[in-house]
Image (cartoon, grey):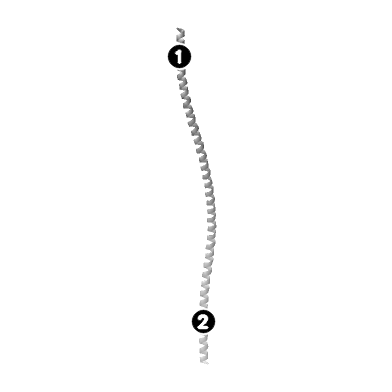
Amino acid sequence: LDKDLKEMRQGLESKQSEVNAKREELARGEEIQKHLTRQLREEKQEEERLGIRCTQLNGNAQHLDKQVNEEMSAKNRLEEEQKDLKAQLKFRQDEIYSLKSSKQKMQKVLEAMQIQKDKDDAESRRLEARTAS
């Protein structure tokens, strides 16, 4: 009987040790589960944060693309305007050059006519002086 009782106690102690080991294992598993659950929640939050940031950056990129396109359009318009202004300037410079040339020719003709008039006036006075004498 003592032997049976001793065997039963040893069996119970063995079972209790197994139960304690299982409880410890279960507690470790629960701690691991809590840790992994917390880690998963944090990673989901980080993923959501990064998703929002990605959306913001995409919006910024689209805005910058739009600005670049607008600036390129403005640049092209200014280049076209500059070409038009250069063409107008060349036309005006050619016109000024032409007018200066015409003015110089007219001055030469005027000088020649003045010289001729002075000669004719001198000739007229000489003829008048001759006829008066």
Element type at mark 2: helix
Local packing at callout 2 (Cα closer than 10 Å; few below 14, some 14-19, many 20+) is few
Residue 28 position in % (x across, y down): 51, 74
Q: Quadrant of the C terminus?
A: top left
Element type at mark 1: helix
For marks 2 and 1, give the one nearer the viewer.
1
Determine the image quadrant of residue 41.
Answer: bottom right
Whole-number angstrom distance, CA of label 2 to CA of label 1: 152 Å
User: Residue flagged by tag 1: what amino acid is it?
Assistant: Glu
Residue tagged by mark 1?
A: 123
Look at 53% across and 70% down and name the residue there: 34
Look at 45% across and 9% down and name the residue there: 130
In the displayed structure, 95 sits above or below 42; it is above
Residue 79 position in % (x across, y down): 51, 43
Residue 127 position in % (x across, y down): 46, 11
Look at 51% across and 40% down and name the residue there: 83
